[in-house]
Amino acid sequence: MNIEKLKELWEKSNDKYADAKRIKTTYQTMYNIIYRGSICKVDLLDRISKFFNVPIGYFFDEPSASFTQKKKNNVAGNQNGITVSDCEIKLSEAKKEIEHLRKMLEEKERTIQILMKKQQFRSKKL
């Protein structure tokens, strides 16, 4: 996790105690994570990201980073090396693939309708 990004957002706060309360944690917990390197649990990171209106992936390195950098970017408890950014990229690719397949299916249906109309026209002529 890139603590510097969290620190940058946190330090813009005018009332850190109130903000910690809105995140449903304590000022001390936030301080320990940012300044003392304490572990930030996934549920807390989720609340922090929602509070600051950023995706969870914001707190991690870019998906194009090397394998060793990606390893640091793992979601807590994730042992297979998949990052939040990786999931977002895969989801985006899957949505594009589905849209492409949908268009192909529509085109095939249109072609079938044209062929059926041609066959009906030929049948009427005979």
Image: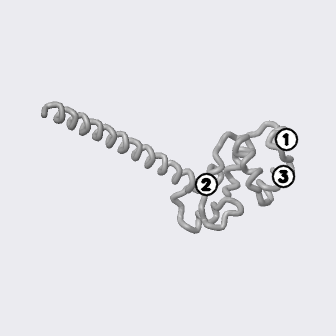
Foreground mark, 1 or 2, reads: 2
Residue indicated by mark 1:
21
Residue found at the far front of this picture? 126
Q: Nearer the viewer, residue 60 or 120?
A: 120
Specify few, some or many for label 1: CA neighbours under 10 Å numbering under 14, 14-19, or 20 or more: few
> Is residue 82 shown left or right of residue 27?
left
Foreground mark, 2 or 3, reads: 2
> Is residue 24 shown left or right of residue 59?
right
Checking the image for residue 84, the label placed there is 2
Tell me the amino acid under the disc marked 1. Lys
Checking the image for residue 29, the label placed there is 3
Residue 119 position in % (x across, y down): 21, 37
- In primary-sequence order, the first of circles 2 and 3 is 3
- Is label 1 in contact with label 3 (beta carbons under 8 Å)? no
- Give the structural element (helix, strand or loop) at label 2: helix
The residue located at (80%, 59%) in the rendering is 36
Q: Nearer the viewer, residue 121 or 67?
A: 121
Tell me the amino acid under the disc marked 3. Thr
- Give the structural element (helix, strand or loop) at label 1: helix
> Is residue 72 shown left or right of residue 13?
left
- For the C terminus, the quadrant is top left
Q: Nearer the viewer, residue 17 or 96?
A: 96
Where, by quadrant of the figure, is residue 69 drawn? bottom right
Residue 101 position in % (x across, y down): 40, 47
Tell me the amino acid under the disc marked 2. Val
* C-alpha separation, residue under disc 2 versus residue under disc 3: 23 Å
The vertical placement of 27 against 82, above or below, is above
- In primary-sequence order, the first of circles 1 and 3 is 1
Specify few, some or many for label 3: CA neighbours under 10 Å numbering under 14, 14-19, or 20 or more: some
* C-alpha separation, residue under disc 1 versus residue under disc 3: 11 Å
Residue 17 position in % (x across, y down): 85, 41
The residue located at (43%, 49%) in the rendering is 97
